[in-house]
Each structure stands twice: as structure tokens, then as C-alpha cells.
Amino acid sequence: MVAAVELDGGPHVVRVTAEPAAAQLETADRWRRLGVPLEPVRPLGDRGTALLTPWWGQGDLLEHPVESAAETAGTIVAELHVRSGELGEAPDRVLDPDVAKAVHAIGLIAPWLGQRADMLAEMISPLVEEAESAELVELHGDLSPDQVLVSGEDGSRVRIIDLDRAGQGPAMRDVGSWVASCRAADHVELAEAFLRGYREITPIDEESLAAWEAYAHLRAALDPFRRREENWPQKASRRISMAERSIHG
């Protein structure tokens, strides 16, 4: 849950999570030392599940789709991936993909998509499992344009937000998540700009990226159903089609 509140000194954002926020505070501290632009964050209340941050910027990249900001975000994320382990610390949480779980849910909720989801799983699983043997880096875990705040007339200043799903995994998992989110939102230009920025720092494994993009689409296929959107069957089918295009090139 996210809420805006007015406190002495200006507006703030309160984020409440189901799990204790201590891990997010540790991640924020570590990422700040690695040069990731974040707003100050502190715990709120006694339950340990709420975080308070100052209100910052004009909005997120979905509200303000500025290509230069997306390119900056790509550079920031690439540097995070490259510099992972530099502090001699690492998050305890390893983000394990569960392709079978996503496919099972689709079969229950949208059985007309079940066969296509099964075929996708057969193609994705070997590539994802192979990618898991690659070097583990620090991941955002839910990377998308709405997790990047923008400020400045030219969108030159950005902040990364929402670290509740951060952990370790293959670098292309974050990149695939970003590209899939951009395509689903019809902002391909943000995907291309992010990739430009990322490539300025380190190369991209295209095959691994395709697999993780397809995984992100598959995993998100039922999000419209979970949000109770009226046209969720069409949106779920669209996500499956995007996953198929990702994996088939």
C-alpha cells in the first residue's frame, strides 16, 4: 500500500508492505553506497512494515515518458549490476523464477491460454535455468518505468524506488522485466533508451534477455485479473502473445 501524507517540511510517501521493511533499509543503504540515486528512507511506526520517504520529482517514467531519463536509468542499473559485490556484501534473498507456478495459475484462471502457456514454459525454462548458473548480481526484482521517478525539465534527474522485491539473480532478469513492462505499456522508446544506457556500461546477452522478457510477460499475464480489470481476458492474451514474440525473436 502507498499513501501520500503531509508532514512538517513537506509531502512524504508512506509505503506499507506485508513483510518487515528491514531488508529494504539494508538494500537502500547498500545501493546508496554503490551510487544508486535514492531518496532518504526511514522506518515509520512500531510494526516494522512501513517506510517513509520524501515526495520527490514530477512523477514516474510512465507518467512522463522521457527517453533521456530512461537512458539514465539504464546506465544506473547497469552500474549496479557491474558493481555488485564491490562492498563485500550481498542480499540473502535469491530471486528464483517459478515458471511452473505462473503456468499453473494461467491454467486455472484462463484455461483457454493454458496450452500456449505450457509451450512457452517448455521454451523458457531451459534458458532461464541456464541463466541462473550465471553470475549473481544485485537486482531490483520488479524493474519497470513506474519504479523510476523523474525530475528536471529534461528529465535528467531520476530516483529508483520500491526495493521490496530486491535480491540476487542474473542481470538480464532486471533488463527483461524493464523491456516487458515498456512493451506492455506501448512505450517501446523507453525500452530502447534504457538498453542504450545499459550498453554504455556493459554488454547485453540477447538470448538471455529474450528469455527473461518472455518470463516477465508470462508472470504478468494475470495482473489485469488480479486488478479486476473489465477486459482482463484480452489483456492476458496480449501478454501471452508478447511472450511468444519475445522468445521467437
Image (tube, grey):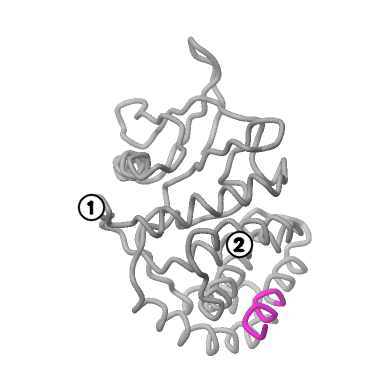
The question of residue 245 being in magenta is answered with: yes
What are the residue bounds of the magenta stretch? 241-249
- Label 2: element kind: helix
- Residue 195's tag is 2
Callout 1: few (<14), some (14-19), or many (20+) C-alpha neighbours within 10 Å? few
Q: Residue furthest front?
A: 200
Identify the residue at image location x=60%, y=89%.
119
The question of residue 170 being in magenta is answered with: no
Q: Quadrant of the C terminus?
A: bottom right
In screen coordinates, is 158 left or right of 171? right
Of residue 24 and residue 108, the one placed in the foreground of this image is 24
Residue located beneath label 1 in the image: 89
Identify the residue at image location x=55%, y=54%.
74
Residue 6 against residue 27 in the figure, above or below: above
Callout 2: few (<14), some (14-19), or many (20+) C-alpha neighbours within 10 Å? many
Residue type at tag 2: Leu
From the viewer's perspective, is the residue at label 2 or at label 1 nearer?
A: 2
Identify the residue at image location x=73%, y=63%.
232
Question: Would you say the residues marked 2 and 1 are in contact, meaning their CB atoms lie under 8 Å apart?
Answer: no
In screen coordinates, is 84 left or right of 238? left
Residue 146 against residue 130 in the figure, above or below: above
Of residue 173 and residue 154, the one placed in the foreground of this image is 154
| Chief SS of the magenta region | helix
Residue 196 against residue 102 in the figure, above or below: above
Residue 12 against residue 39 in the figure, above or below: above
How far, Cα to Cα, is label 2 from label 1? 27 Å
In screen coordinates, is 199 left or right of 91? right
